[in-house]
Image (tube, rainbow, N blue to C red):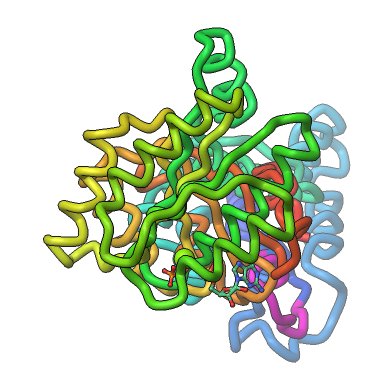
Amino acid sequence: MKKEKEKIQEKIVSKPVEEKVEKPKTGLGSKIIGLLRRPKKPEEVGKPGKPEKAQAREEIKKEVKKEEGFLAGILKKVKEKILTEEDVQRFLDEMQTVLLENNVALEVVDKISEELKKNLVGKSVNRKNVNKVILNALKDSILSVLKQEPLDIEDVINACKSENRPCTILLLGFNGTGKTTTLAKLGNYLKKNKHDPVFAAADTFRAAALEQIEIHAKNLGVDLVKHDYGADAAAVVFDAKKHAEARGKDVVLVDTAGRNHADVNLMDELKKICRVNNPDLKILVIDTLTGNDAVEQAKKFNDAVGIDGIILAKADVAEKAGAALSVGYVTGKPIIFMGTGQGYDDIVKFEPEKIVEELLK
Ligand SMILES: Nc1nc2c(ncn2[C@@H]2O[C@H](COP(=O)(O)OP(=O)(O)OP(=O)(O)O)[C@@H](O)[C@H]2O)c(=O)[nH]1
Ligand SMILES: [Mg+2]
């Protein structure tokens, strides 16, 4: 009798998590959720009869009919399952591929996998809830890589105010990521929140950069401090700070030239701007459309000047945001805003919980 019972238990324990086969959908969320369903093995396909769960239950009932005491215990085993390393690994293998296909950085994929294993292996779950349990654990692990120490720029501005000095916020990053547009959006956002910013035109390098920021300053009714093309960018910021002090402005928003992190001269110029002016916040603007290079950019700019936060521009047009979403984790610095269009109001606070819901819906 004992042998019989053992055989039945083996059958139950080796039973697959889920038998349903679903048509693949598109998108990161549905792809990952799709992974929660294991397709049938070829030898299982086409087998006639009842679903395995019902079949197993019937067999148990037959075998232990007269032993009512055992029935409850065995049925519990039918309902519950201990997630093994193998169960979790099977899901992880495929999930990792989906994340990598969406440009999520390898170290972030490793971190998510490690968290998932830690939270799931050995966990006893009701078979009906296996998918839900894995999905919730996945949400938690993605959230843990998206969430860094929060940063509210208004808190920093107010802290400077209490010291009776303007707050200097510098935007920096690779060529064309969206720095100047983001600066204009921040100016608009701060004005709406009762601040009084001044713009510093510290991109004295790229053709038409001065005219571009001049238009934004005029449109928004914000003071602009500028020198000529080729002027020392550090001196522009210095003058803008003086201007803010003299006029009682509480924020200096600094536009810097786009630069390749591998260009030593331009990186030296950025270091000089920071050394001379000691900005209160150095914010890296990342183009969400950038692929894996976004992670490299974030690391290099952070190593060079020590960034405080990140803004993801062009989030409205990015399909594979995995790399951009990885930059917070690889630098340990928070993503604070996302650019969602080309208009002045197209900027939203970065809320990791919302992003995770969006990714996995
Ligand atoms: N769709 C969309 N486009 C954006 C966003 N932010 C910036 N852009 C566009 O991206 C392009 C480059 O923006 P800029 O602000 O000039 O970028 P930059 O980093 O200042 O460029 P350089 O100064 O040349 O390094 C422009 O066409 C902007 O309109 C955004 O959030 N969404
Ligand atoms: Mg610019």
| 292 shown above or below 83 | below
> Looking at the rendering, which quadrant does residue 339 occupy?
bottom right
Q: Quadrant of the C terminus?
A: bottom right
Q: Is residue 191 left or right of residue 309?
A: right
Q: Position of residue 212 (x, y in %)?
A: 55, 69
Q: Is residue 133 above or below residue 62?
A: above
| Count of picture labels | 0
Residue 33 seen in the current view? yes
From this view, report whether residue 10 is shown above or below residue 140: below
Q: Quadrant of ligand 1?
A: bottom right
Asked if residue 326 lies left or right of residue 321, the reply is left
Q: Nearer the viewer, residue 47 or 221?
A: 221
Foreground of the two, 72 or 311: 311
Q: Residue furthest top?
A: 162
Occupied quadrant, residue 329: top left
Residue closer to the observer: 52 or 226: 226
Instruction: Identify the residue at image location x=71%, y=54%.
Output: 347
The residue that appears at 52% across and 74% down in the rendered structure is 289
The image position of residue 270, as x and y in percent, is: 25, 50
Q: Is residue 31 magenta?
A: yes
User: Which residue is rendered at x = 43% and y = 74% of the image?
Assistant: 291
The answer to whether 318 appears left or right of 114 in the picture is right
- Residue 280: name its quadrant: top left
Q: Please identify the quadrant where the N terminus is shown.
A: top right
For the question of whether residue 99 can be seen, the reply is: no
Q: Is residue 29 above or below residue 166?
A: below
Per the rendered image, the range of residues in magenta is 21-32
The percent position of residue 36, horizontal first and vertical second, equals: 66, 63
Is residue 225 found inside the magenta-colored segment of the image?
A: no
The image position of residue 160, as x and y in percent, is: 52, 17
Q: Residue at x 56, y 29 (%)?
A: 150
* Nearer the observer, 324 or 307: 307
